[in-house]
Amino acid sequence: MRLTTEQLAWSVHGTPLLTDVNLTVEPGQTFGLVGPNGSGKTSLLRLLAGLNKPKSGRVLVDHQPMHTLKQRAIAQYIALVEQQADTTDRITVRQVVSLGRTPFLSALRPWSTEDDAIVAQALRDVDMAHMTDRLWHTLSGGERQRVHIARALAQQPKILLLDEPTNHLDIRHQLSILELVRQLPITVVISLHDLNQAMECDRIGVMDSGRLIDSGQPQDVLTANRLEQTFGVHARVIDDPADGKQIMLFRSAI
Ligand SMILES: Nc1ncnc2c1ncn2[C@@H]1O[C@H](COP(=O)(O)OP(=O)(O)OP(=O)(O)O)[C@@H](O)[C@H]1O
């Protein structure tokens, strides 16, 4: 599905937090959202997920305005993995991931063995199958993050929104989750602080003070100048002699 925003704006108590965001993510693309702390990445993801309502402008899913879609349809199309999702309930890993199937269940379509298989596959995808029966509150931060991603995968969304999904993960799980996400044949918007990881996205957008100030191919967007102006760091961008891929070497904060 194509995800588009048109002149999207959002504010809280009269303070503008997002201004004039125009964005298109083509079906099947992985779009990386980068920007300094407080630049508006989470706010934008929540609008794309339909959790916050725009002050003006709109979000389109394919060519349909999001505000015309039923809640259940949005839940069937779009999954969001938030940064600080938590629960105090006594709930097992399997139960958390099973929540991803909720939008598809009804009196006419009760839980089936197909749902069991989807949940089991999602747990395998994030390397959590061995902890299926563990209670949520006993998990480490990285394990919780992987379970949240499994919940979103179990939803089998057409659009997957991920807010810094690699935050708590060790390097092996960071790389495996990013690889998994890139290979999904669905539209993905992923916010990332690791700019070298963002280089692997199909396209990238830079947020600054609530505006999308640049978007395009990662190597065209994440230049030494951009790193200086927007991220406030001196960096060198070099080519990896092994495969020619660009790598950013961060030298110092400005
Ligand atoms: N509900 C709210 N009420 C007031 N201010 C808010 C609210 N939500 C977000 N903000 C502010 O909006 C700005 C953008 O926040 P947001 O969480 O979208 O940034 P971000 O780019 O995701 O940041 P980070 O990289 O630190 O996660 C911040 O200054 C934040 O304090």
Image: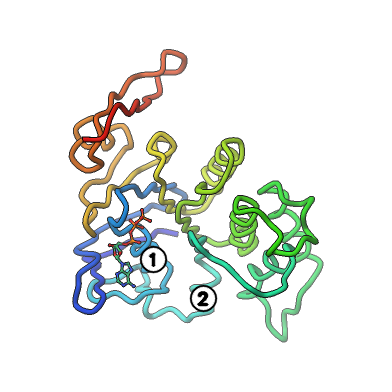
Residue type pointed to by label 2: Ala
User: Residue lying furthest top in this view?
Assistant: 241
Which mark lies nearer to you, 2 or 1? 1
The tag earlier along the polypeptide, 2 or 1, is 1
- Name the side, left or right, on which 203 lies relative to 231: right
The one nearer the camera, 126 or 157, is: 126
Q: Secondary structure at mark 1?
A: helix
The one nearer the camera, 119 or 28, is: 119
Query: What scheme was used to colour the molecule?
Result: rainbow
Task: Give the alpha-carbon distance from disc 2 to disc 1, as whole Å.
Answer: 14 Å
In this picture, is 23 found above or below 234? below
Quadrant of the rendered image containing residue 113? bottom right
Residue type pointed to by label 1: Leu
Quadrant of the rendered image containing residue 222? top left
Q: Residue at x 72, y 51 (%)?
A: 128
Q: Residue at x 24, y 71 (%)?
A: 57
In this picture, is 222 found above or below 43? above
Residue 52 location (% of width, % of height):
37, 74
In this picture, is 233 found above or below 78? above
Q: Residues within 10 Å of mark 1 (few under 14, many from 20)?
A: many
Residue 160 location (% of width, % of height):
50, 58
Q: Secondary structure at mark 2?
A: helix
Q: Quadrant of the N terminus?
A: bottom left
- Label 1: which residue? 48
In this picture, is 41 found above or below 201? below
- Label 2: which residue? 73
- Name the side, left or right, on which 72 lies relative to 194: right
Residue 100 location (% of width, % of height):
63, 67
On residue 162, the disc is none
